Image (tube, rainbow, N blue to C red):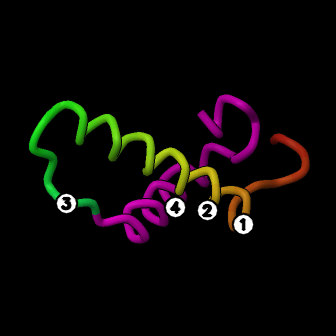
Amino acid sequence: AAFLAGQIGFTQIASSVEAVMGAFAPAAPACLDDVLAIDAEARMRSSEILDKSFARTSPV
């Protein structure tokens, strides 16, 4: 979503995914509600990480 919104460049996709995965270690989901909660948490954390580390002021 950040790439499509112009917040990060194509070459930053892998490093942003790596940063989010490295900062987030959820427990194994036991049900669909757990999966949805993990997804929401990962999206929130990715937004925070992108805002701090990968965001740029103008899209390339």
What whole-number distance in Å separates the C-alpha atoms at marks 4 and 2? Answer: 11 Å
What whole-number distance in Å separates the C-alpha atoms at marks 1 and 2? Answer: 5 Å
Name the residue tied to disc 1.
52
Query: Which mark is first along the chain, 1 or 3?
Result: 3
Look at the image and give the residue range highlighted in magenta.
1-25
Where is the N terminus found, in terms of image quarters? top right
Query: Which mark is first along the chain, 2 or 4?
Result: 4
Q: Judge whether 6 appears above or below 46 on screen.
A: above
Task: Tell me whether the residue at label 3 lies in contact with that at label 1, contact meaning CB atoms closer than 8 angstroms.
Answer: no
- Measuring 69% from the left and 46% from the top, which residue is drawn there? 9
What whole-number distance in Å separates the C-alpha atoms at marks 4 and 1? Answer: 13 Å
Q: Amino acid at mark 3?
A: Ala
Image coordinates for residue 15, horizontal then vertical, percent? 51, 61
Task: Tell me whether the residue at label 3 lies in contact with that at label 4, contact meaning CB atoms closer than 8 angstroms.
Answer: no
Name the residue tied to disc 4.
15
Name the residue tied to disc 2.
49
Relative placement, left or right, of 51 versus 14 is right
Which numbered dot is residue 27?
3
Secondary-structure class at tag 2: helix
Q: Nearer the viewer, mark 4 or mark 1?
A: 1
Query: Which mark is first along the chain, 2 or 3?
Result: 3
* Residue 14 included in the magenta stretch of the image: yes
What whole-number distance in Å separates the C-alpha atoms at marks 3 and 2? Answer: 20 Å
Q: Quadrant of residue 55?
A: bottom right
Q: Amino acid at mark 1?
A: Lys
